[in-house]
Image (cartoon, coloured by chain):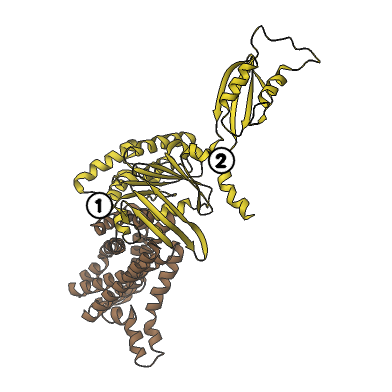
Chain colours: A brown, B yellow
Amino acid sequence: MATITIFRRELGAYLRSPVGWIIAAVTLLLQGILFQVFAARNTLAGDMLSNFFMWSSIVVVIAGVILSIRLISDERQSGALMLLNTSPVRETQVIAGKFLAALAFLAIILLLSLYIPLLIKSEGKITRGQIAVGYLGLFLLGGTSLAIGLFASSLARQPLIAAVVGAAIAGLFAIFYQLSRLLDAPMKTVFAELDIWWLHFQGGFMRGIFDLKDLVYYLAMTYFFLLLSVKTLEAKRWQ
Amino acid sequence: MIQVKSLSKYYGGKRALGPVAFEIEEGETVGFLGLNGAGKTTVLRILATDLRPSAGAVSISGIDALTDPHEVRKRIGFLPETPPLYPEMTVTDYLRFAAELRQVGKSERTARVGASLEATDLVDVAHQPIGTLSHGYRQRVGVAQAIVHRPALVILDEPTRGLDPRQIVEMRKLIYQLKDKHTVLISSHILSEVSQTCDRLLVFGEGRILGAGTEAELSAHEGDVRSVSLTVRVPAGKAEPYRDGEADPKDKIVAVLQRIDGVTAVDAPLARGDGWALSIACTRDLRAEISRAVVQAGLDLLKLDYATSELEDTFLRLVQAPRAEAA
């Protein structure tokens, strides 16, 4: 019940405030520009679509972190978090409500970008399945990015610090694959598998390949960072 | 309603509060008085289950706040120093949100939001975004969210902070209304606020309770200086013309009063209409002795007021005592 209450308030805050729409507009603008500059050069529709998903994934990770950093640190700074802290609401409900609202808003942004793959489809040979799998990948990657941002937000009092921490964590997980190349097995495999972008997105969803392993990876990563957020909120709430 | 035992709060190795102990009965309005940093906000945040104490026990409505803060939160409404508001929400949406969080049933929600809007005189701005409201209105929205679920205990931390005199009067009226339905705790460093709205005061200083009781009880400490003000007149017909070289009638009046046992000082008389106004400092209630002495001296007693030391004096004496001891 409290999760739905918090979800509705947070989604309303994204939809009512200019900040939410500015993030949405910039995300869509960047997706469009990057598509025009890099992806549209490809002559094959399949390559064009993969390239679109690749550039979009970078934009989505950044947008995810930015969308989620304000969720707790901003409220902590303004004092609004006190309402939740002194209400009969569990930390799990707070985190779930806020995360789902941010995820819903990110889903709206992703839906608004759907015109690009539809344009590609109208001119070339790609399937709906390729588009759907690519978007599922963006959605899952965005969810993980939101969870990382939410965790950073639960740690820091200042939204700016939360943004830096969130970007640092997301950046670190995005270079694990590169780092793994410097290591020997078994750490090489561990680092490569932990990477949020190379193996699981670029090697799968981006190319229209759905692998259950990639789905489980993103869900596990999202759950892990949400759990960290809950524990951080618990530790800071009644301390 | 509230039982607090040996309550302490440490930040790192630094003691911010305690140990303090007090009890508050249901229906009481209690003022938490103290200078900035005295520990009153720390106590209120502990009672609001926002801060966990380092040691001690807190029971609210028979529920242990340390082991079951979630259950306590259902029974309290808290207005912190900075009201917990969302500027983009309208007042009604915000109160509805607060009511939902506090588990007010769907069927009751509209009525409760309406009642708290009326109680806090926010009906006119009910559909305005909170971000567009003045500071006074925002403070009222803060109070409205604290009472929307009709909690047994309402905690208001510095509710008049930053308000102009007109808004302070309105807030005071609002607090008066709350007294009928809730147990109310108010913190302030402004004496007039708590003395006018509260049944009882707890005076805090350097993390401890320095005094507790009603205004009169706090003022009636042993060794307090009491003050009697009076206006006397030399009766018409008995007044002798005053000439240079003779005793001034003012000096005669002062001499009469100074002879009374217990009078420690008599201020110089001031002409007030056709009489003289004086202020007398004494160690106990000497109204009877003063009136007798004045009449026996053949003077008319026009006015006699007895006052214990002002609350400000009591407050300053209480909060300065630990500092003096430390020095």
Determine which quarter of the picture holds residue B291.
top right
The secondary structure type at the circle numbered 1 is: loop
Alpha-carbon neighbours of circle 2 within 10 Å: few (<14), some, or many (≥20)?
A: few
Q: Given the image, what chain letter belongs to the residue carrying mark 1?
A: B
Q: Which residue does the image show at 43% across and 57% down from the upper left?
A: B7
User: Can you name the residue that lies furthest to the bottom here?
Assistant: A184
Q: Which residue does the image show at 37% across and 78% down from the upper left?
A: A174
Q: Is label 1 on the same chain as label 2? A: yes
**Quadrant of the drawing holding the N terminus of chain A:** bottom left
Name the residue nearer the viewer: B53 or A31: B53
Q: Can residue A6 be seen in this view?
A: yes
Alpha-carbon neighbours of circle 1 within 10 Å: few (<14), some, or many (≥20)?
A: some
Which percent across, then down, holds residue B283? 60, 34
Q: Name the residue under label 1.
A: B103
Q: Given the image, what chain letter belongs to the residue carrying mark 2?
A: B
Q: Which residue does the image show at 25% across and 77% down from the upper left?
A: A205
The secondary structure type at the circle numbered 2 is: loop
Which percent across, then down, holds residue B79? 39, 48
Q: Which mark is drawn over residue B222?
A: 2
Determine which quarter of the picture holds residue A82.
bottom left
Residue A189 in the figure: left or right of residue B163: left
Q: Can residue A88 be seen in this view?
A: no
Q: How far apart are marks 1 and 2 (CA)?
A: 50 Å
